[in-house]
Structure formats: C-alpha cells, structure tokens
C-alpha cells in the first residue's frame, strides 16, 4: 500500500513529535503492507514553518535515520495545504504538490466551507494542478449533504477518505458519511492522516473492514493503484463504477447495518 496522507515528519506540525513516535508508526505501517509514504505536514504558514527547504532538510535527516534503524520504507515529499486565496499563486514557488506530481492535497475549514472555496479550487485546476480534498467526510457541509462530494468530482476535485473515519474515530456521523461515499464510488484514495497519536495503524484495520463489503479490487484501487499513479504523475479516473467491487451476497443489507449501528 501507499499512504498518501501522513503527519509523520517529526516536529513539523501537530503530528509526530519525535523520531521515536514516527518509528513506532513506521513499523506498524510496514506490518500492514505499506511500502511508500507521502509525508504531508500541514502547510499553514501562520502556524508552522513548513516551507520547502525546511521540509526537504527534515526528510533527508529522517531518511538517514531509517537506514540506521533498518526500516525499509520509501518516503516522498508533500504537504497538506490549508487553502486560502493565495494558495493558487504559490503552488509552484512553494512546491506544494505531492512528490513530483501535479496532484495537491488540500483541506479547508471543517465547520463551514469558505464562500470562495470553489473559486480557489477552480484557479488551481485551471493552472493545471489536480486537487485532492482531504477527508471530505469530516466537513459539516458534506455530512449534511453527501451529494456535494459528487459535485466536487464534477469540478475535477479528487477525494481522499481517512481510514479512521471508517472506523468511527471522528464520531458516528463522520463514519456514516465515509461509508456512504465509499458505497457510492465517491472516493479515490484511502489514507491514514496518521498523526502518531494512536498505537495502531488505522489504514491497516480499515482495509480489513472494507473487505467485508467490497472485494479486494476496491482496496487495491484506493490504496495501491490510484496512489501509485500520483507517484508516477499519471492520470486517475475521476468517475468509475463501484458496482464491480460489491460483494454480492446481501451487500446493501450488511452495509446499511454498518451505517445505522
Ligand atoms: Fe492531515
């Protein structure tokens, strides 16, 4: 698997605070079958000094530590951009994309989408970049109206659901929204958004649960194939048929039981 959303670069943001915390998570990730990680510290200049040089030098240090600890994981550079009206203009100069791709991981206010959100995203798409909205299932607007997820897709915005959301780590409403998006095919990536604040690895657990309702092809699409296309800067299908991934036997009955339980 390739985990495209992690906060495991020590001392960069509200994620991992130390090398030890990151190493603990890296070991759990390897056990779960992760080969590659995109490090995505928050890019919020008012709060964190996560400019290009700072992140790059910290990644180099972390890579040398992994060699010392004999931890075999490929680390890739990225950030999670908290959108504001300046974001479209600084993507290239601040290297705000994932790896060397045109994909860019973005987040915004949880309680209410800013009124200029669509305009900001439009500018990013128009300049040739491919926004991926982090954890759509956690935004109040989408919890109230999950159809908004598909609206984003029609505007060329990809969607990344957090594994912890599927497990109920952000509450029942977020969990229900995450499973709804998954069952509609309105998800392109499953990732951990790992802040090193738990002693387990949510993506490893979530993929086992997803396999109760969907066949292994869906997990592969969301954790291997699509993330792999980011690393190769290849095009990812925005729309796909989710029905091919349903496990036929009483699929909806089981999933509804999950959503209302
Ligand atoms: Fe995040």
Image (cartoon, helix red, strand yellow):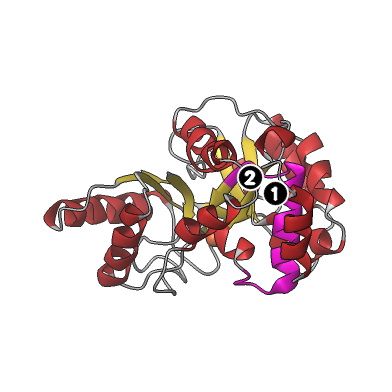
Query: What residue sits right under mark 2 in the picture?
Result: 214
Foreground pick, 226 / 127: 226
Query: What residue sits right under mark 1 in the picture?
Result: 182
Which numbered marker is on residue 52? none
The quadrant holding residue 198 is bottom left
In the image, the segment drawn in magenta is 168-189
Mark 2 sits near ligand 1, with its Cβ under 8 Å away: no
Residue at point 52% right, 38% down? 220
Quarter of the figure that contains the C terminus = bottom right
Spot occupied by residue 136 in the image (x, y as percentages of width and height): 70, 55
- Looking at the image, residue 125 lies above or below residue 80: above
Foreground pick, 42 / 213: 213
- Looking at the image, residue 172 lies above or below residue 60: below
- Left or right: 244 in relation to 37: right
For the residues labelled 2 and 1, say whether their Cβ atoms are less than 8 Å apart.
yes
Spot occupied by residue 112 in the image (x, y as percentages of width and height): 80, 66
- Left or right: 89 in relation to 220: right
The quadrant holding residue 259 is bottom right
Spot occupied by residue 143 in the image (x, y as percentages of width and height): 80, 63
Mark 1 sits near ligand 1, with its Cβ under 8 Å away: no
Spot occupied by residue 126 in the image (x, y as percentages of width and height): 72, 31
Q: Is residue 113 visible?
A: no
Residue 76 magenta-highlighted:
no
Q: Secondary structure at mark 2?
A: loop
Q: Quadrant holding ligand 1?
A: bottom right
Q: Is residue 222 visible?
A: yes
Q: Residues within 10 Å of mark 1 (few under 14, many from 20)?
A: some
């Amino acid at each position: 698997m390739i985990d495209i959303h992690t906060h495991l670069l020590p001392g960069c943001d509200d994620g991992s605070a130390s090398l030890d915390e990151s190493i603990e998570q890296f070991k759990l990730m390897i056990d779960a079958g992760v080969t590659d990680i995109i490090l995505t510290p928050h890019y919020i200049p008012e709060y964190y000094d996560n400019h290009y040089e700072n992140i790059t030098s910290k990644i180099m240090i972390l890579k040398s530590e992994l060699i010392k600890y004999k931890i075999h994981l490929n680390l890739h550079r990225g950030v999670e951009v908290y959108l504001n009206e300046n974001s479209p203009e600084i993507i290239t100069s601040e290297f705000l994309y994932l790896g060397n791709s045109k994909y860019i991981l973005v987040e915004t206010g949880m309680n209410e989408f800013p009124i200029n959100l669509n305009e900001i995203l439009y500018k990013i798409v128009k300049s040739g970049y491919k926004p991926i909205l982090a954890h759509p299932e956690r935004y109040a607007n989408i919890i109230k109206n999950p159809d908004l997820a598909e609206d984003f897709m029609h505007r060329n915005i990809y969607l990344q659901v957090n594994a912890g959301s599927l497990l109920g780590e952000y509450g029942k409403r977020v969990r229900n929204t995450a499973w709804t998006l998954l069952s509609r095919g309105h998800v392109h990536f499953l990732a951990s958004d790992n802040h090193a604040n738990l002693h387990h690895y949510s993506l490893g657990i979530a993929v086992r649960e997803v396999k109760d309702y969907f066949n292994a092809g869906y997990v592969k699409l969301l954790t291997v194939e699509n993330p792999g296309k980011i690393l190769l800067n290849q095009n990812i299908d925005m729309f796909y048929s989710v029905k091919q991934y349903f496990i036929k036997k009483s699929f909806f009955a089981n999933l509804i039981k999950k959503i209302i339980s």
